[in-house]
Amino acid sequence: MSFLPQISLSAHRLLLTGLSVLLAGCNIDKALFVPDVDVANPTSLVDVTVLPTLRNSVISDMQVALGAGGESGVIVEGGLLGDELTWAETFPTRGEMDQRNINPINATLSTIYNSLQRARATADRTSAAYYKLLPGNIARSEVQAMAAFAYILLGEMYCNGVPVSDFDVNEGTFKLGAPQTTVQLFTTALAKLDSALVGVDVSVAANASVVNLIRVGRGRALLNLNRAADAAAAVALVPTTYRYTLFHSENTGRQNNGPYVATLLGQRHTVSGSEGGNGLRFRLDSTDVRVYAPRGRGGANSPVFGFDGTTPFFVQTKYATRSAAVIFADGTEARLIEAENLARSGGAYIPVLNALRSALPSLIVAPPGPATLLPNAPAVAALPPLVAPAAAADQISQVFQERAYWLFLTGHRLGDMRRLIKHVGRAAESVFPSGNYFKGGAYGVDVNFPVPFQETNNPKFTQCLDRNP
């Protein structure tokens, strides 16, 4: 028995006619086509409602530039070229960095360069979007500050001659930039920071975090321009307890903490101790909670040897998980800028350093971890006070060591080592690791990263203007 409704012949003809009309007016291919499934067109990014998404992309790209989402980034690779980390694996591209002999044709070099330039470009474009659509919003100041920090990091990491190019999203064309010196990069950063608070009420409590981020950024840029007194004045109002944090998570690889991946998880790099004769002690100062790095005890995340099976492995305990946060700027850095200015000008810097040391329990983010692998970790307690050495040169060294320990594995050390050469007047081979390299051969002479070979596709760029500090 049929349960279909009975339809008269005339009704059937009307139904078919109606369907024919509908089908004639409907392009099935067009109905099923979804344009740009995973790409946002430039025309979709010109509305005020997308600005928070753009802001988030700025912060995310800066996280990646520092090292999130993989092993390569400013923190780890800068630590290798400096004296914070030692190569404990087999990838030659990173070995070149640790040995201070970097070839511009280097895949790891390209990775960190691309990430940092991407963070800079994203922040610049987002800042421009805020200026156009919502110029008085504090988020505009924040992303402009992020752009400035990207310029600072380019100046601290790379040689003289970094091109700054851009992509015109409206025209679909590249605007290739000419090489810039480190002074030009720092000057650009300072100009961005100086204008970031125009039209913003700095007295509003909700704006305080961004206001202090900009103050610390100005201090950092001014230090790099050898204007220590101006740098100290720039950070004077930053509370010691202030902290601007870049957060990570376990959710995806892009969100993972990069230094954790490169050290505890992958055992690619170990913490240094008096590397190359000139490096700071770091792992040897095992009672200092700021840089505590014990020898691996065996087992996951704490091997006796690194990835190469031969290099003794010392565990960095600052970033104990994939979700460990990175302090991007804080009040501790502000006080260290003030201390450096005092030391370089013959002032009383010791009280500034000792005030930080006595406040360590409230300033450190977390105790050394993971606790299950570190039964003998030092307690989080106030550090004993320092006494100023008699010689002025030793006083400068004391300040820079305190900077290195407080700012360990945060992307500051390479810039500090270069400033010791440029501004304090020390010889490069008395600052950077030198002499015989522990895996054979000798240390090279690099004190910064070259611009990678890929940039020669830019007709305005040939090579670094120079490799001077």
Image (cartoon, rainbow, N blue to C red):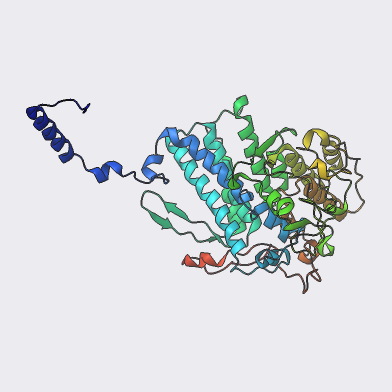
User: In the current view of this chain or complex, which residue is farthest to the left?
Assistant: 10
Q: Does residue 219 appear in this view?
A: yes
- Percent x, y of residue 56: 53, 39
**Depicted 108 relative to depicted 225: above or below:** below
Seen in the image, is 333 located left or right of residue 128?
right
Q: Where is residue 397 in the image (x, y as percent from the top left)?
A: 83, 53
Residue 341, position as x, y percentages in the image = 77, 46
Where's the C terminus, which quadrant? bottom right
Marks counted in the figure total 0
Q: Which residue is drawn at 88% across and 49% down?
A: 286
The residue lying toward the viewer, choosing from 84 and 26, is 26
- Residue furthest toward the bottom? 441
Tell me the residue at 24%/43% (across/down): 28
The quarter of the picture where the N terminus appears is: top left
Viewer-proximal residue, 458 or 321?
A: 321
Question: In this rendering, is residue 439 above or below 386?
Answer: below
Q: Is residue 147 visible?
A: no
In the rendered image, the vertical position of residue 107 relative to residue 48, given as above or below? below
Q: Which of 43 and 295 is in front in this view?
A: 295
Q: State left or right for residue 307 relative to residue 62.
A: right
Residue drawn at 63 percent across, 30 percent down: 208
Q: Percent from the top left, x then y, of residue 316?
A: 78, 50
Decide if residue 60 is on the left or right side of residue 75: left
With 380 as the anchor, is 103 left or right in this view?
left
Q: Nearer the viewer, residue 239 or 257?
A: 257
Residue 450: quadrant of the picture: bottom right
